[in-house]
Amino acid sequence: MKSLIYPIIGIGALAVACTGQQTGSAYKVSASTAEEDNGKMAYLVNYDNGEKIDSVIIADRSIAFDGNVEKPVMVRMLIGDKRAGVFILEGGDITIDSLGVAQGTALNIKLAELDAKEDSLATVYLNLTDDSLRNVVEQELVAMYDSAIGACNDNPVGYVAFMNRAYSLDLKQLDSLVAKYPSYKEYARVQKLMESKRAEANTAPGKLFVDFTIENDSVQQKLSDYVGKGRYVLVDFWASWCGPCRREMKNIKELYQKYHADGLDVLGVAVWDEPENSKTAMEQLELPWPQILNAQTIPTDIYGISGIPHLILFAPDGTIEARGMQGEELKSVVGQAMYSFTHPATIEQVAPIQ
């Protein structure tokens, strides 16, 4: 994070200029690694679609890729199955530092500049308490992304900016952005995000729940086994490896203890996780509510969930009342719902005037 060295208003002309590399360029990628990695395979994998592009055997604590790339592409480097950095594979000599950051070529330099500007804006934002000034910083960040999306629409720098911008948009806004810059629709992650936004719109507050079935050891569990049964149900989509999921459990436990007797149930749905890891986490966290394990991507595809923890509050009739809350917002939303549930409005019967 950068220190605060500039005023908020006019935080800098954050327009992004971008020049793509010529196609068919030769690349060399070098990195140092640990002694225990000797003899392992290192891979370059297309970040967008997961396809392997190159591989080498690690020797003398060094990784050295050498080849040709038709056009610049965002890649992830793997050491065995361990992630070791994301960068742009393009023509030229690329050096990966100990933090997984690429240096030495034009687009990687441009990507680093974009990241640095984003960090600076984040630092400013976190040090502000005035909402109007925070809004200014947010607009600066949006302007920076928009500039990169337009200027770099033929290379991965624009792709990174597009994805960072797109996650905060609703379906209509995302469709408009893709219509303006159709080249981004070629990316698999953009297509996946558009599908996710459509699923999210179909399961927005006010919509009836969409059921799903998970089978483990010939035993089937359905969302409808728990939802729409006359009680409020808070469904927590989580994974054992997810730190924010674990931290949110404290708030969920507090709500469960406070409102369970009054009509609130909690259901955990373990996604993107191995069942044994989920079971271990359940024991460690001492979770008292039922769980659907090994759900993987089935419910997250249906409900358009792109990040966890993700919590959805279902009303007693199975209607989605709220979703995406955490922390104090979660407590407030559930508290208001349970107050209304336990204090139903009454209609006073008044005799007609004779």
Image: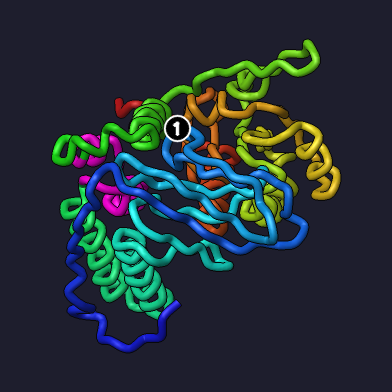
Q: Is residue 206 visible?
A: no
Q: What is the residue that sits farthest to the top in this orientation?
A: 218
In the image: residue 36, left or right of residue 78: right
Position of residue 89 measured from the top left corner of the image (x, y, whole percent)? 39, 50
Q: Is residue 302 visible?
A: yes
Q: Which residue is at a point 65% across and 27% down the rendered structure image?
A: 295
Q: Secondary structure at mark 1?
A: loop
| Mark count | 1
Q: Eyeballing the image, is 80 above or below 85? A: above
Q: What is the residue that sits farthest to the left in this orientation?
A: 180
Q: Which residue is at a point 58% across and 67% down the rendered structure image?
A: 98
Q: Which residue is at a point 56% across and 41% down the rendered structure image?
A: 55
Magenta segment: does it hold 175?
A: yes
Examine the image and state in which quarter residue 247 appears.
bottom right
In the image: residue 45, left or right of residue 176: right
* Magenta stretch bounds: 154-177
Q: Which residue is at a point 45% across and 32% down the rendered structure image?
A: 304
Could you tell me which quadrant the C terminus lies in?
Answer: top left
Q: Nearer the viewer, residue 276 or 156?
A: 156
Examine the image and state in which quarter residue 184 appears.
top left
Q: Which residue is mark 1?
A: 304
